[in-house]
Image: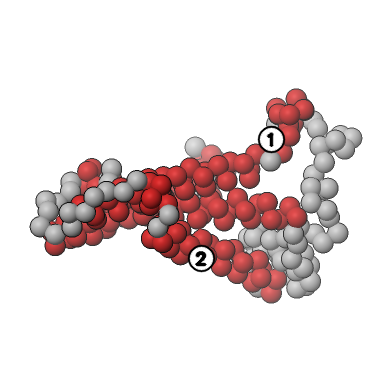
Amino acid sequence: MRTWLRLNALSLVVFAAFFVFLVLQSVFGWQTRNEELAEAGRAADTYLGYLGSGHFAEATFENWESEFLQMGSYVLLTVFLVQKGSAESRPLDEEGGSGDDPDKPGAITKESPLPVRKGGLIRKVYENSLSIALLGMFLLSFLMHLLGGTAEHNEELSLTGEPPISALDFLGTSTFWFQSMQNWQSEFLAVGSLIVLSIFLRQRGSSQSKKVSEPHAKTGSG
Protein backbone atom coordinates (compact mmCIF):
# COMPACT_ATOMS: atom_id res chain seq x y z
CA MET A 1 0.00 0.00 0.00
CA ARG A 2 2.81 2.41 0.85
CA THR A 3 4.45 1.75 -2.52
CA TRP A 4 1.13 2.26 -4.34
CA LEU A 5 0.56 5.55 -2.53
CA ARG A 6 4.05 6.77 -3.42
CA LEU A 7 3.65 5.82 -7.08
CA ASN A 8 0.27 7.57 -7.34
CA ALA A 9 0.88 10.45 -4.93
CA LEU A 10 0.67 13.26 -7.50
CA SER A 11 -2.80 12.38 -8.81
CA LEU A 12 -4.07 11.46 -5.33
CA VAL A 13 -3.04 14.80 -3.82
CA VAL A 14 -4.39 16.83 -6.75
CA PHE A 15 -7.77 15.05 -6.76
CA ALA A 16 -7.99 15.25 -2.97
CA ALA A 17 -7.45 19.00 -3.18
CA PHE A 18 -10.12 19.18 -5.90
CA PHE A 19 -12.62 17.36 -3.69
CA VAL A 20 -11.89 19.52 -0.64
CA PHE A 21 -12.25 22.76 -2.60
CA LEU A 22 -15.42 21.53 -4.33
CA VAL A 23 -17.01 20.73 -0.97
CA LEU A 24 -15.99 24.14 0.39
CA GLN A 25 -17.37 25.82 -2.73
CA SER A 26 -20.69 24.03 -2.23
CA VAL A 27 -20.90 25.04 1.45
CA PHE A 28 -20.11 28.70 0.84
CA GLY A 29 -22.30 28.76 -2.26
CA TRP A 30 -25.17 27.28 -0.25
CA GLN A 31 -24.78 29.99 2.38
CA THR A 32 -24.61 32.70 -0.29
CA ARG A 33 -27.69 31.37 -2.05
CA ASN A 34 -29.70 31.25 1.19
CA GLU A 35 -28.71 34.83 1.96
CA GLU A 36 -30.12 35.83 -1.43
CA LEU A 37 -33.32 33.86 -0.79
CA ALA A 38 -33.72 35.42 2.64
CA GLU A 39 -33.42 38.91 1.14
CA ALA A 40 -36.19 37.98 -1.33
CA GLY A 41 -38.40 36.60 1.44
CA ARG A 42 -38.09 33.00 0.22
CA ALA A 43 -37.50 29.82 2.21
CA ALA A 44 -33.91 28.64 2.49
CA ASP A 45 -32.61 25.68 0.45
CA THR A 46 -31.45 22.52 2.16
CA TYR A 47 -27.83 21.59 1.43
CA LEU A 48 -28.86 18.64 -0.75
CA GLY A 49 -31.41 20.84 -2.49
CA TYR A 50 -28.69 23.37 -3.21
CA LEU A 51 -26.50 20.72 -4.85
CA GLY A 52 -29.25 20.26 -7.45
CA SER A 53 -29.71 23.97 -8.04
CA GLY A 54 -28.73 26.09 -11.02
CA HIS A 55 -26.62 28.26 -8.70
CA PHE A 56 -24.28 25.35 -7.88
CA ALA A 57 -24.26 23.90 -11.42
CA GLU A 58 -23.47 27.24 -13.04
CA ALA A 59 -20.63 28.07 -10.65
CA THR A 60 -19.11 24.61 -11.01
CA PHE A 61 -19.34 23.96 -14.73
CA GLU A 62 -18.39 27.43 -15.95
CA ASN A 63 -15.01 26.81 -14.27
CA TRP A 64 -14.63 23.24 -15.50
CA GLU A 65 -15.44 24.45 -19.00
CA SER A 66 -12.54 26.91 -19.04
CA GLU A 67 -10.09 24.41 -17.55
CA PHE A 68 -10.78 21.73 -20.15
CA LEU A 69 -10.76 24.28 -22.99
CA GLN A 70 -7.37 25.54 -21.88
CA MET A 71 -5.84 22.08 -21.46
CA GLY A 72 -7.30 20.65 -24.68
CA SER A 73 -6.22 23.68 -26.70
CA TYR A 74 -2.78 23.64 -25.14
CA VAL A 75 -2.23 19.97 -25.99
CA LEU A 76 -3.08 20.71 -29.64
CA LEU A 77 -1.10 23.97 -29.85
CA THR A 78 2.07 22.26 -28.62
CA VAL A 79 1.85 19.92 -31.61
CA PHE A 80 2.18 22.80 -34.09
CA LEU A 81 3.81 25.69 -32.22
CA VAL A 82 7.08 26.11 -30.33
CA GLN A 83 8.50 28.66 -27.89
CA LYS A 84 12.26 29.04 -27.86
CA GLY A 85 13.66 28.46 -24.38
CA SER A 86 10.41 27.26 -22.79
CA ALA A 87 10.26 24.02 -20.82
CA GLU A 88 6.69 23.69 -22.09
CA SER A 89 7.71 23.49 -25.75
CA ARG A 90 9.00 20.57 -27.79
CA PRO A 91 12.56 21.02 -29.14
CA LEU A 92 12.89 23.53 -31.99
CA ASP A 93 14.35 21.00 -34.42
CA GLU A 94 11.54 18.46 -33.95
CA GLU A 95 8.48 18.57 -36.18
CA GLY A 96 5.15 17.93 -34.48
CA GLY A 97 4.87 14.23 -33.74
CA SER A 98 8.07 13.35 -35.60
CA GLY A 99 9.76 12.20 -32.43
CA ASP A 100 6.89 9.87 -31.62
CA ASP A 101 6.42 7.69 -34.69
CA PRO A 102 5.05 4.22 -33.90
CA ASP A 103 5.95 3.09 -37.43
CA LYS A 104 9.65 3.33 -36.72
CA PRO A 105 11.32 -0.08 -36.47
CA GLY A 106 11.22 -1.35 -32.89
CA ALA A 107 8.87 1.42 -31.70
CA ILE A 108 6.00 -0.97 -30.97
CA THR A 109 6.63 -3.67 -28.38
CA LYS A 110 4.45 -6.17 -26.58
CA GLU A 111 4.11 -3.62 -23.76
CA SER A 112 2.76 -0.90 -26.08
CA PRO A 113 -0.94 0.00 -25.53
CA LEU A 114 -3.38 -2.35 -27.27
CA PRO A 115 -4.70 0.28 -29.76
CA VAL A 116 -1.13 0.95 -30.91
CA ARG A 117 -0.47 -2.74 -31.48
CA LYS A 118 -3.75 -3.20 -33.38
CA GLY A 119 -3.08 -0.29 -35.75
CA GLY A 120 -5.50 1.15 -38.29
CA LEU A 121 -8.32 3.49 -37.31
CA ILE A 122 -8.23 2.53 -33.63
CA ARG A 123 -4.59 3.60 -33.45
CA LYS A 124 -5.32 6.85 -35.28
CA VAL A 125 -8.00 7.69 -32.71
CA TYR A 126 -5.68 6.69 -29.86
CA GLU A 127 -2.93 8.94 -31.24
CA ASN A 128 -5.25 11.90 -30.64
CA SER A 129 -7.15 10.55 -27.65
CA LEU A 130 -5.79 13.04 -25.10
CA SER A 131 -7.01 16.12 -26.97
CA ILE A 132 -10.26 14.34 -27.90
CA ALA A 133 -10.94 13.54 -24.23
CA LEU A 134 -10.09 17.03 -22.96
CA LEU A 135 -12.10 18.85 -25.63
CA GLY A 136 -14.95 16.38 -25.17
CA MET A 137 -15.03 17.24 -21.46
CA PHE A 138 -14.96 20.93 -22.44
CA LEU A 139 -18.05 20.48 -24.63
CA LEU A 140 -19.85 18.54 -21.89
CA SER A 141 -18.95 21.19 -19.29
CA PHE A 142 -20.04 23.93 -21.71
CA LEU A 143 -23.44 22.25 -22.05
CA MET A 144 -23.79 21.78 -18.30
CA HIS A 145 -22.80 25.41 -17.72
CA LEU A 146 -25.48 26.47 -20.22
CA LEU A 147 -28.17 24.34 -18.56
CA GLY A 148 -27.12 25.29 -15.03
CA GLY A 149 -26.84 28.95 -15.98
CA THR A 150 -30.30 28.87 -17.53
CA ALA A 151 -31.74 27.33 -14.37
CA GLU A 152 -30.01 29.93 -12.18
CA HIS A 153 -31.12 32.79 -14.43
CA ASN A 154 -34.72 31.55 -14.30
CA GLU A 155 -34.53 31.22 -10.53
CA GLU A 156 -33.48 34.88 -10.38
CA LEU A 157 -36.32 35.84 -12.74
CA SER A 158 -38.82 33.99 -10.54
CA LEU A 159 -37.82 36.18 -7.58
CA THR A 160 -39.13 39.21 -9.48
CA GLY A 161 -42.11 37.43 -11.04
CA GLU A 162 -40.71 37.43 -14.58
CA PRO A 163 -41.26 34.50 -17.00
CA PRO A 164 -38.47 31.95 -17.55
CA ILE A 165 -36.38 31.75 -20.72
CA SER A 166 -35.04 28.80 -22.70
CA ALA A 167 -31.44 27.56 -22.76
CA LEU A 168 -31.17 28.80 -26.35
CA ASP A 169 -32.27 32.27 -25.25
CA PHE A 170 -29.77 32.23 -22.38
CA LEU A 171 -27.02 31.20 -24.82
CA GLY A 172 -27.60 34.49 -26.63
CA THR A 173 -27.30 36.66 -23.51
CA SER A 174 -24.27 38.71 -22.56
CA THR A 175 -24.54 37.17 -19.06
CA PHE A 176 -23.66 33.68 -20.33
CA TRP A 177 -20.70 34.85 -22.39
CA PHE A 178 -19.47 37.14 -19.61
CA GLN A 179 -19.37 34.12 -17.31
CA SER A 180 -17.39 32.14 -19.89
CA MET A 181 -14.96 34.86 -20.97
CA GLN A 182 -13.96 35.85 -17.44
CA ASN A 183 -12.74 32.27 -16.96
CA TRP A 184 -11.36 31.61 -20.43
CA GLN A 185 -9.07 34.65 -20.38
CA SER A 186 -7.65 33.77 -16.97
CA GLU A 187 -6.84 30.20 -18.03
CA PHE A 188 -4.87 31.31 -21.07
CA LEU A 189 -3.10 33.97 -18.99
CA ALA A 190 -2.00 31.26 -16.55
CA VAL A 191 -0.68 28.85 -19.18
CA GLY A 192 0.95 31.68 -21.15
CA SER A 193 2.71 32.81 -17.98
CA LEU A 194 4.00 29.27 -17.40
CA ILE A 195 5.30 29.06 -20.98
CA VAL A 196 7.23 32.33 -20.71
CA LEU A 197 8.36 32.11 -17.09
CA SER A 198 9.80 28.63 -17.65
CA ILE A 199 12.29 30.22 -20.08
CA PHE A 200 14.01 32.17 -17.31
CA LEU A 201 12.96 30.59 -14.01
CA ARG A 202 13.51 27.12 -12.56
CA GLN A 203 12.00 24.75 -10.04
CA ARG A 204 14.48 22.09 -9.07
CA GLY A 205 13.04 18.61 -9.33
CA SER A 206 9.90 19.57 -11.31
CA SER A 207 9.06 17.99 -14.65
CA GLN A 208 7.61 21.36 -15.66
CA SER A 209 10.99 23.07 -15.37
CA LYS A 210 14.30 22.82 -17.16
CA LYS A 211 17.28 21.68 -15.12
CA VAL A 212 18.66 24.46 -12.93
CA SER A 213 21.99 24.50 -14.77
CA GLU A 214 20.53 24.62 -18.29
CA PRO A 215 20.76 27.87 -20.33
CA HIS A 216 17.71 30.02 -21.01
CA ALA A 217 17.85 29.12 -24.72
CA LYS A 218 17.39 25.38 -24.01
CA THR A 219 13.96 24.41 -25.29
CA GLY A 220 11.96 21.59 -23.70
CA SER A 221 12.29 19.98 -20.28
CA GLY A 222 13.66 16.65 -21.50
The residue under the point 41% across, 61% down is 174
Q: Residue at x 48, y 62 (%)?
A: 181
Q: Secondary structure at mark 2?
A: helix
Per the rendering, the mark at residue 70 is: none
Numbered label attached to residue 186: 2
Horizontal side of 115 relative to 68 (left or right) equals right
Q: Position of residue 102 (x, y in %)?
A: 81, 37
Q: Residue at x 38, y 52 (%)?
A: 170
Instruction: Give the x, y percent position of residue 146.
Output: 41, 48
Identify the residue under disc 1.
Answer: 126
Residue found farthest to the right: 105
Does the rendering let one see residue 204? Answer: yes
Residue type highlighted by circle 1: Tyr
The answer to which of marks 2 and 1 sits earlier in the sequence is: 1
Quadrant of residue 8 in the image? top right
Q: Horizontal and vertical percent for residue 218?
A: 78, 67
Image location of residue 125, percent across then percent down:
69, 34
For marks 2 and 1, give the CA distance.
Answer: 30 Å
Which sits in the foreground, 219 or 156? 156
As drawn, the residue found furthest toward the top would be 118
